[in-house]
Each structure stands twice: as C-alpha cells, then as structure tokens.
Image: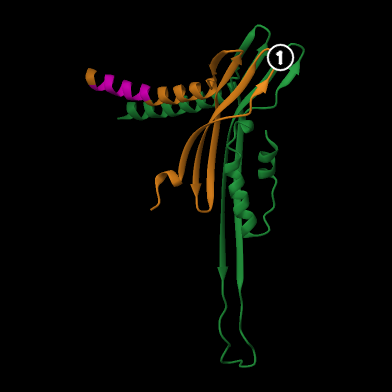
Chain colours: A orange, B green
Amino acid sequence: MTKLTDFIELKTVQGTAVSTPQHTLIPESQALIIKFPFGGFVWQRPTAVLVQNGAQSERHPIVDVTRLATISVMAASLLIPLLLRLIKKQTA
Amino acid sequence: MSENFNKLILESIPDQKSANELMGRLFDVTRPDAVFSQPVTMGDHTIINASEYSATLGMGYGGGGGGGPNPEEPEQQANGIGGGGGGGGATMSRPVAAIIVSPDGVRVEPIVDVTKIAITMFTALGAMAMALRKMKGK
C-alpha cells in the first residue's frame, strides 16, 4: 500500500565535519523532499552548526532572517485589514 | 554549490533511463554539503557560507502507434509509430548566513536579502491598500 511518506519526506542530515585549528564544525541541514512519478521537488535549508571544542559541544542555530521578515510582512498584510474590518464593524 | 548539484542543472537527456537517473540525482543532492560551502581560510579566520536551495523537476513521455493498410491503396502498407518527451525544472539558491570561525570563537552572521524583503513589503502594501479600498466602498 502506498503511504504518504513515500511521496513526502522531511529529514535532518548532518554533513562532513570541517576542522579548523581551534574547532571542529559539523553542519546540519533539513530537507523537504516531495516525489512524484515523473517529477519532484527538493527544498533544503541550513538549520545549525555543531561546534566541538575538545570535550565541549555547542549548537549554533542558523536563523533565516529574510524568511522570517517576509513571513511577518505577509502575515501583517493579512491581519491588519481583518482587524480594521472588525474595528469598523464594532464601531458601526 | 556541490559538483553534483551543478551536474543536475547541466544535463541532456537522451533516453528515459537517463531521465530516471537524473530524477534520482535530484534527491541525491539533499546532503548538507549542498547548502554549506567549502571553508575559506584567511589568516586566523575561516568562513563557511550557508545557503538554502530549492530544486524542482518534471518530465513526461508519450508514444503512439500506427494503423493498417489503406483499402484504397492496397500496395501501400500504412504504418507509423511515434514518441516524444519533454521536461523542465528550476533551481533557486539564496545565502542565509555566514559562519565565521576565529580564535575568539564561532559566530553565525545572518545574511539579509533587503531586496526580497522590500519587494514583499511593497506587494503586501499594495494588497492591503486594495483591501482597504474595497472595505471603504462597501
């Protein structure tokens, strides 16, 4: 039986470690894969970098500021007219 | 970008088998090496660029057959076969952050795409203006 996971997959993967004189970095990314019989879509974004310094390990998340800003602007453009409409209805 | 990713973009497809292999390669590029660049070292500092990317690919095939002989022209054997295919795709990549490794430590500096934000803002303002104008008209 065909499952949804056969078509849509969301996975977090860690890449090859990069060594610098002071630290060892392990890149981490997340991929969304949508498969069709004759096509497909892949979206991959960096999520974090794991920094190892001796026995210490630290996770530095990677924030996509551009995506956050665009989503906020789009959300505001939907919410502001709705709020104004509600206010107008209440005052009328 | 990885070599594998570039191969995906510049590819001619002679047959269906190659097309299926190309499709498989689309999903192979989901490795972190595709979003993280090779480290660039300058003095004490090492910089790694992190980008997001998306790729989409689609293809289709079709074929046809032929008919029997024409009764008006018995000598002529009618026959025919045909086939064809086509495909297309698109890729997009955008830098998200720069990872800077220095003797002081590791820091992640975001890369802000001001043009993209500005375009989204003007589009949103236009949509809001239209919505408010419609509200006033009622």
Q: Along the line of sight, which residue is nearer the eye, A89 or A69?
A: A69
Name the amino acid type tagged 1. Pro
Asked whether the viewer can see residue A92, the reply is no
Q: Residues within 10 Å of mark 1 (few under 14, many from 20)?
A: few
Residue B73 is situated, as x and y percent measured from the top left of the image, at 61, 92
Residue sticking out furthest to the top: B104
Q: Residue at x 61, y 84 (%)?
A: B78
Left/right of residue A84 with respect to residue B112 in the rendered view: left
Which image quarter holds the C terminus of chain B?
top left
User: What is the magenta range?
Assistant: A79-89
Mark 1 chain? A
Counting from the top left corner in percent of width and height, residue B95 is at 62, 26
Q: Residue under label 1, please give it.
A: A21
Q: Residue at x 61, y 56 (%)?
A: B86
Residue closest to the eye, A19 or B57: A19
Residue A85 is inside the magenta segment: yes
Find out whether residue A38 is within the magenta segment. no
A77 displayed left or right of B94 = left
Relative to B42, say whether B85 is above or below: below
Which image quarter: residue B96?
top right
Classify mark 1: helix, strand or loop.
loop
Residue A57, percent from left and from top: 55, 15
A74 vs B11: above or below: above
Instruction: Please tell me which residue lies in front, B133 or A17.
Output: A17
Q: Is residue B26 above or below residue B96?
A: below
Is residue B105 in sight in this rendering?
yes
Q: Please identify the quarter of the rendering in which residue B2 is found.
A: top right
**As drawn, which residue projects farthest toward the front?**
A55
In front of the other: B72 or B91: B91
- Image spot of residue B12 (x, y percent): 69, 52
- Residue occupying image coordinates x 63% and y 33%: B34
